Image (cartoon, rainbow, N blue to C red):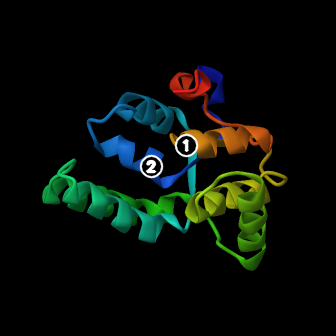
Amino acid sequence: MSANNGDRLVVFDTGALIQLHTQERFNALSRQVYNQANQIGMCYLVMPEIAGATGAMLRDKRISKQQRSQIQKFVMSNLQHWLMLPVSKRVCDLAFELCQKHPLKGADAVHLAAVKTLLPFRPQLTFFTLDKTLYQAAKREKVPVVMVPELERGR
């Protein structure tokens, strides 16, 4: 994300949000995007996804119980400060259509659909995902994304 994007709303998907608290591949980029954003947004779907994703990371020994607790506490305590995108019938219908057009998982399609639904009202928003398939689908749907060089190169 370039320095002039700091006034934009940046909508994080769950994976990008988790990267703020890990020592994994995209930690530095996630922190940079988070710190430069004027406003953070995410889909309400992040609440159950954060529990599921951190549970999987704990089982895979990628994070400790303490790290899982810290990530979940961070998310739950900041919900009131972030713009939360609803998961409405309209969003679910659009997510269904997106799954027909792109090889998306259902939850990823919900994130993208929520962003697409908000985009006409907040044209300066930028979507931040670290999932290659979701990143490519967002670009094909003409949703502005935070550029991730590794995903641009097809890795």
Q: Quadrant of residue 109?
A: bottom right
Is residue 18 at least partly visible in the picture? Answer: yes
Could you tell me residue 33's position as x and y percent? 50, 34
User: What is the C-alpha distance between the residues marked 2 and 1?
Assistant: 7 Å
First-in-chain label (2 vs 1): 2
What kind of element bears circle 2?
Answer: helix
- Residue 85 image offset from top left, x and y in percent: 64, 64
Please tell me which residue is depicted at 78% across the width and 54% down the height of the picture: 101
Residue at the location (58% across, 54% down)?
A: 41
Q: How packed is label 1: few (under 14 Cα within 10 Å), some, or many (20 or more)?
A: many
**Vertical relation: 86 (above or below) 127:** below
Residue lying furthest right in this view? 120
Q: Nearer the viewer, residue 81 or 63?
A: 63
Closer-to-camera residue (10/47): 47
Q: Residue at x 82, y 54 (%)?
A: 121
Residue at point 22% right, 53% down?
Answer: 60
Can residue 10 be seen in the rendering of this structure? no
Q: Amino acid at mark 2?
A: Gly
Kindly identify the amino acid type of the residue bearing the numbered disc 1: Thr
The residue identified by callout 1 is 129
Q: Is residue 38 above or below residue 101?
A: above
Q: Horizontally, is 1 left or right of 121 in the view?
A: left
Q: How many marks?
A: 2
* Secondary element at image label 1: loop
Which residue bears the numbered disc 2?
A: 15
Q: Which mark is residue 46?
A: none
Question: Residue extending furthest bottom?
Answer: 89
Which image quarter is the N terminus in?
top right
Q: Residue 42's image quarter?
A: bottom right
Q: Quadrant of the rendered structure where residue 47 is?
A: bottom left
Mark 2 near mark 1, Cβ–Cβ under 8 Å? yes
**10 Å crowding of disc 2: few (<14), some (14-19), many (20+):** some
